[in-house]
Amino acid sequence: MSEQRVIAGNWKMHHGPSATRTFFRDFAPDLGESAPTLIIFPPALSLAAAVESRGGRPEVHLGVQNIHWEEKGAFTGELSVSMVLDAGATYALVGHSERRHVFGETDGEVALKVGACVASGLTPVVCVGETLEERRGGRLEEVIERQLEAALEGLTARPGAHFMVAYEPVWAIGTGETATPEDAAGAHAVLRSVLRKALAEDHAEEVPILYGGSVKPGNAGELLSTAEVDGVLVGGASLDAESFARIAESV
Ligand code: PEP
């Protein structure tokens, strides 16, 4: 279990610059002493609006939803690590299930992206998770172990680099189906043991492992009180400032 508590919001392809400004105007969680790390992943086009409008709010870190491993060049539509750092992002989602399953991102590409992030000081949040078919076929462990081991190949040049893992069962993303706290605890324990095998002892314990998949204000508290769950990665319920604030307050 990591000491760090993390509440992250993935806006996917929602909230352009105007809606981003409105979100930050309204986002006012009452965090008391809990002070989780708050991260929002807006569309890259809305990063500048987020940087401008987050001032005066509790500290909110910003990230991008995808990244390319090359520094620059003929890669139409892609963003490099140095560009997004320059624009004010400090995190990147890597291997989100929509990138893997809609856009065909491979384990090898995930490793390249992780490598590019850690080489330049952008913190990757590596997403892993099984499909319903894989789960029903008894392959949950095999799939998430393979995905995380492949992503860790990207750390070879920077073995102590800061990163996070998000367990996001594909069947729970955007479906209203949430893994039970026991399901999340079991999968997180598998991921922690992969980290323990691959990394130095202290480092393996420090890496936050987040749960994602239909997290809402009504279920966040129970998930976050599960010892193996260090934080949550929230999609739909992070779009509304009030609902995301209530999730942040559940820590
Ligand atoms: C996500 O997009 O990472 C996610 C977990 O989505 P949702 O919360 O909508 O299931």
Image: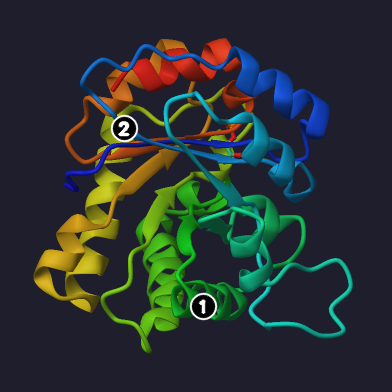
SS class of the residue under badge 1? helix
Is 40 rendered above or below residue 18? below
The image shows residue 163 at horizontal and vertical percentages of 37, 62
The image shows residue 54 at horizontal and vertical percentages of 58, 31
Answer whether residue 240 is visible to the viewer in this image. no
Q: Is mark 2 within 8 Å of ligand 1?
A: no
- Residue shown at 58%/61% (left/top)? 95
Task: Judge depth for marks 1 and 2 and give the one in front.
Answer: 2
Relative horizontal placement of residue 85, taking residue 147 as reference (left or right)? right
Dot 1 or dot 2: first in sequence order is 2
SS class of the residue under badge 2? loop
Mark 1 neighbour density, 10 Å: few (under 14) some (14–19) many (20 or more) = many
Say which quarter of the image contains residue 99: bottom right
Q: Mark 1 to mark 2: distance in Å?
A: 27 Å
Say which quarter of the image contains residue 132: top right
- Residue shown at 38%/80% (left/top)? 155
User: Looking at the rendering, in which quadrant would you find the C terminus?
Assistant: top left
The image shows residue 96 at horizontal and vertical percentages of 59, 54
Q: What residue did someone put label 2 on?
A: 36
Looking at numbered disc 1 in the image, what kind of residue is underneath it? Answer: Ala
- Residue shown at 63%/41% (left/top)? 51
Answer whether residue 202 is visible to the viewer in this image. yes
Q: Is mark 1 within 8 Å of ligand 1?
A: no
Q: Nearer the viewer, residue 4 or 58?
A: 58
What colouring style does the render use?
A: rainbow
The image shows residue 250 at horizontal and vertical percentages of 32, 17
* Quadrant where ligand 1 appears: top right
Looking at numbered disc 2 in the image, what kind of residue is underneath it? Answer: Pro
Mark on residue 111? Answer: 1
Say which quarter of the image contains residue 223: top left
